[in-house]
Image (cartoon, grey):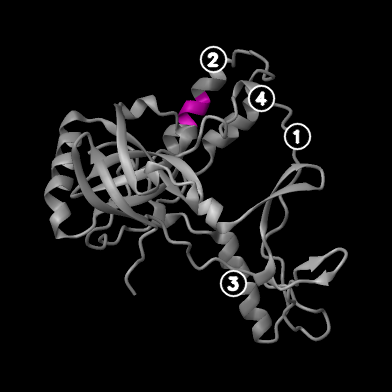
Amino acid sequence: MAARPTWQGHLRLSLVTCPVALYTATNPGGEVRFNLLHPKTHNRIKMVATDPDLGPVERSDLVKGYEVEKDRYIVVTPEEIESVRLESTRTIDIERFVDVADIDRLYWDNPYFLVPDGKLAVEAYSVIRDAMAGAKRIALGRVVMHTRERLLAIEPRGKGLIAWSLRSYDEVRDPADLFDDIPAKKADASMIAIARKIIEQQDGPFEPQAFKDRYEDALRALIKRKEKGGKAKVSAAPPEDTNVVDLMEALRKSLGGKAPAKPPARKPAAKGKASATKTARKAS
C-alpha cells in the first residue's frame, strides 16, 4: 500500500512556488502493544465516556472545550477551529536560510520526506533543491500540522528534500537549570587519558542494524513461550548495585577488558534508502 502524505500544500521561495507533500520518514515498527483485559473473562475492556452527573455519554455527542480556570471551560466548535486558518496551513513559506550548525540538537524533532506533488512541480522543486545544495544552507519555514504551527528545517538530500520539525523555544528547557548544579570539578588528567583509551577501544562506525530493541525481542519471546503453554523466566539478572570506591582501579580494569564485538557484516542497502553512516542532519 502506498504511503499517505501527512500534509499536502505548496513550498514557496519568494515568488517561486511548487506543490509538495510531506511523508513521515520513520516507521512506527512492530512494537509490542498490550490491551487491558478483565482478569477472569479475558475480555477486552471498553473505555466508556462518562459524565460524572449523567453517566455514559455517546462519543458523537461530545464537544471540545478549553479549561480557562478550575472547572470552567470555553466550548469551541469544529467550525470555529477550522476558521483559524493561517497561510502556513497550506503553504510552507521559506523565511530564512541558516547554517546547520546554528540549530541546537535539542530543537530537532521528527523527520519528513518533502517531495514534489505531481510532474508539474518537479522543475521548481529542483531549482529550490539545487540552489540550497549549492549554498550549503538549511531553509526555515512554517507549516500547520495536527492543529499546531511547526517550524521546519529543510535540507537537500540526494534528489529530494528532508524536512525536520523543530521544537519551539518554549518546549526546550535550559540546560543550565540542571547543569549549573554540577560541581565545577576538573577531572584527573591520568584518569582522562585512560578513559580516552577506552573510547578508542570502542570506537567504530554507526551501524543502526546492529542495535536492535532487545527489550521488545524479550517481550515477544515471553509471549511466544506463554502461547505454547510455557512460563515466564528471568533471562537476565538485575544489575548489581556496586559503589565504585576506586575510580582509577575501575578505569584500569575497563581498559584491560575485551574490546566490544564488531557488528555483523552490513547487508547491501535497499535502493533509495539513506546510508546509515551519513549524518542525518548534514546538508548534502
**Residue 21, horizontal then vertical, whole percent:** 30, 55
Identify the residue at horizontal 61%, vertical 66% (top origin): 218
Frontmost of labels 4 and 3 is 4
Q: Which mark is residue 189?
A: 2
- Which is more toward the observer, 144 or 174? 144
Which amino acid type corresponds to the residue marked 1 in the rendered image? Asn
Q: Earlier in the sequence, mark 2 or mark 1?
A: 2
Q: Are marks 2 and 4 in contact (CB under 8 Å)?
A: no
Identify the residue at horizontal 52%, vertical 34% (top origin): 255
Image position of 55 (left or right of 188): right
Please name the residue that numbered disc 1 is placed on.
243
Give residue 100's quadrant in the image.
top left
Which amino acid type corresponds to the residue marked 4 in the rendered image? Leu
Vertical order, 48 against 271 (above or below) = below
Frontmost of labels 2 and 3 is 3
Frontmost of labels 1 and 4 is 4
Q: Are marks 2 and 3 in contact (CB under 8 Å)?
A: no
| Residue segment shown in magenta | 194-198
Q: Earlier in the sequence, mark 1 or mark 4?
A: 4
- Which is more toward the observer, 92 or 40? 92
Which amino acid type corresponds to the residue marked 3 in the rendered image? Arg
Q: Are marks 3 and 1 in contact (CB under 8 Å)?
A: no
How crowded is the residue under tag 3: few (<14 C-alpha within 10 Å), some, or many (20+)?
Answer: some
Q: Which mark is residue 80?
A: none
Q: Could you tell me which secondary element the residue under label 2 belongs to?
A: helix
Q: Could you tell me which secondary element the residue under label 1 belongs to?
A: loop
Please name the residue that numbered disc 3 is placed on.
220
Farthest left residue in view: 123
Q: Could you tell me which secondary element the residue under label 3 belongs to?
A: helix
Please name the residue that numbered disc 4 is placed on.
178
Frontmost of labels 3 and 1 is 3
Structural distance between the alpha carbons of marks 4 and 3: 37 Å
